[in-house]
Amino acid sequence: MPDESANKPRPADERRGLILVNTGDGKGKTTAALGTALRAVGYGQKVLVIQFIKGTWHYGELDAVARIPEITLVRAGKGFYKIIDDKFTEAEHREAAAAGLAFARESIAKNEHSLVILDEINVAVSLGLLDLADVIGLLDLKPPHMSLILTGRNAHPDVIARADTVTEMREIKHAFKQGILAKRGIDF
């Protein structure tokens, strides 16, 4: 007879941090990560959010997070790369991404946060602003209790393989394609 205990959920190990990936072409990757940040704060945990691509626009998350002392948000990127109103050189984008990665490495080593969100880091890798090996090396630095969330489209298969949980947001329909511009409080 097969062992049915193998299919039963195991109790959560509160001391073991996870690596989560939010990827795909649909909306909601950063929003889902920030929802997890709110959940962590609800349990008294400290959260660090490092944004690798967003950086020049003002968006609602900045004001909301400023009201929550347990969440620190750092804008490491120079903004959108090669789209919309990008006015920075590739070298400037690479430099900002490298500085963001160095900051993430230092922050993870300091071990002061229960959750670190590496927002749009998958995009920074897929666009060649960061080396995949450096991001995998960052995952190796994670203390056992800390959780990491990596967001952004085009998550590399090696990042997906390292993750404990991967969620793919898939676009089915988007208001922008119907001529509706981004809405404050919904899209930014």
Image: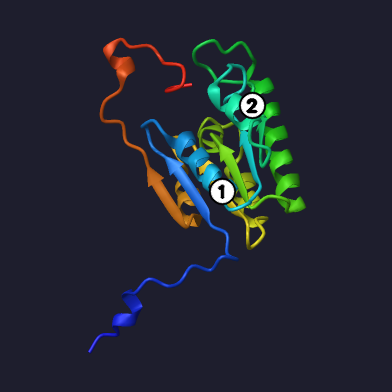
The coloring applied to the image is: rainbow
In percent of width and height, residue 129 lies at 60, 31
Q: Quadrant of residue 28?
A: top left
Q: Quadrant of residue 182?
A: top left
The residue singled out by tag 2 in the image is: 77
Quarter of the N terminus within the rendering: bottom left
The residue that appears at 31% across and 31% down in the rendered structure is 171
The residue that appears at 38% across and 37% down in the rendered structure is 24
The residue singled out by tag 1 in the image is: 42
> Given the image, on which type of amino acid does mark 2 rest?
Gly
**In the drawing, what numbered circle is on residue 119?**
none
Q: In the picture shown, does residue 88 fall above or below 62?
A: above
The residue that appears at 39% across and 46% down in the rendered structure is 167
- Left or right: residue 128 versus residue 32 is right
Badge 1: how crowded within 10 Å, few (<14), some, or many (20+)? few
Tag nearer the camera, 1 or 2: 1
Q: Earlier in the sequence, mark 1 or mark 2?
A: 1
In percent of width and height, residue 76 lies at 67, 29
Nearest the camera: 100 or 156? Answer: 100
